[in-house]
Structure formats: structure tokens, C-alpha cells
């Protein structure tokens, strides 16, 4: 039914395709770049270290890079350490800072560009081409 164009389609079908074929690969690539730049990605709970003054310090660990990538695409805010990408484990270099600023802006401009073209295409069958209007 969704291929014939006689209805609007199935929301869940479109949602699953978007998550599996668009958001997951982009998140995977962003997480790899964050790990290569120094963001942590492990399954440890905490690391206890001794400081220069010989006092113990507990450092939180975890799957930071993968959750950071998902957070940036969803523009959800907060983050793994609740500092909104200001923690050095989430955002270790200037390159990752630039990357994170660009990733936050991937989806909203694309959404606005497609909805801005809607009045011109109303009433006729169109297909999203992935280009700017």
C-alpha cells in the first residue's frame, strides 16, 4: 500500500527505516571519530587513581562516545557526564568540538528545507530526493 501512493504510508515502517538506515550508520561513524580523537568508550564502571597529592580520585567510565553520538543527532542535551559536551571525556579536542557543533545541525536544517518546499508541491505527487529545494 505504501508503494502505490494511495495513502500516506506506514509511520512505523518509515521510523524503523530511518533509524536503521540513516541514524545508526551516522551515529556509528561519529562514535568512531570521537574514540579516535580521545573520547572514552568502555564498559568499566569507575577507575580509582592516585593524584599528585596521593589522595584517591574516582573517575567515571563507560560508553561515552556511542551515547554522545546518539545525543548529538537527537539534540537531546545533557550527555553522559551531565555537562552538555563540556567534559573532556566527551569532547577531548577542538576537532571534536567542531564535529559536535556540525552534527547537532545535521537534522534541523534538512527538516526545514523539506517543509519550506511543501506549499509549492502541495496537490501533486512528489518524492523526496535528498537534495536542497
Image: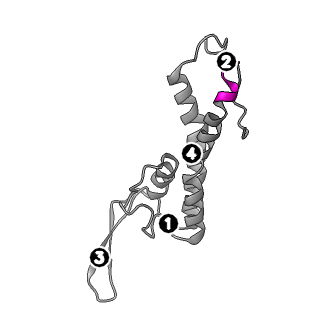
Q: CA distance from mark 2 to mark 3?
A: 64 Å
Q: In the image, is residue 112 above or below residue 88?
A: above
Task: Evaluate if marks 2 and 1 touch, with contact meaning CB atoms under 8 Å apart.
Answer: no
Q: Which residues are magenta?
A: 119-124
- Per the image, the residue denoted by label 1 is 91
Point 56% across, 59% down: residue: 101
Question: For the N terminus, which image quadrant?
Answer: top right
Compute the Cα span from label 4 to label 1.
Answer: 22 Å
Q: Residue beneath label 4, please?
A: 108
Mark 2 or 1, nearer chain start: 1
Q: Quadrant of residue 24?
A: top right
Q: Earlier in the sequence, mark 2 or mark 3?
A: 3
Establish if 37 lies above or below 103.
Answer: below
Q: On screen, 98 above or below 19? A: below
Q: Separation of disc 3 and disc 4 at Cα?
A: 40 Å
Percent from the top left, x then y, of residue 107? 58, 45
Determine whether label 4 and label 2 are within 8 Å by CB.
Answer: no
- Residue at (33%, 60%) from the top-left corner? 45
Coordinates of residue 116 in the picture (x, y in percent): 63, 36
Check disc 4 and report its element: helix, strand or loop. Answer: helix
Do the CB atoms of the residues marked 3 and 4 lie less than 8 Å apart?
Answer: no
Q: Nearer the viewer, mark 4 or mark 2?
A: 2
Label 2, residues with CA under 10 Å away: few <14, some 14-19, many ≥20: few
Amino acid at each position: 500500500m505504501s508503494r502505490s501512493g494511495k495513502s500516506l504510508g506506514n509511520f512505523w515502517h518509515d521510523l524503523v527505516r530511518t533509524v536503521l538506515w540513516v541514524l545508526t550508520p551516522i551515529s556509528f561513524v561519529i562514535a568512531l571519530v570521537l574514540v579516535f580523537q580521545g573520547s572514552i568508550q568502555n564498559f568499566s564502571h569507575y577507575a580509582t587513581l592516585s593524584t599528585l597529592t596521593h589522595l584517591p580520585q574516582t573517575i567515571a567510565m563507560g560508553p561515552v562516545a556511542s551515547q554522545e553520538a546518539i545525543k548529538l543527532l537527537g539534540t537531546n542535551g545533557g550527555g553522559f557526564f551531565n555537562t552538555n559536551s563540556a567534559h573532556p571525556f566527551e569532547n577531548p579536542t577542538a576537532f571534536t568540538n567542531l564535529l559536535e557543533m556540525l552534527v547537532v545541525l545535521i537534522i534541523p536544517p534538512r527538516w526545514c528545507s523539506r517543509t519550506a518546499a511543501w506549499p509549492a508541491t502541495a496537490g501533486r505527487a512528489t518524492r523526496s530526493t535528498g537534495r536542497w529545494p
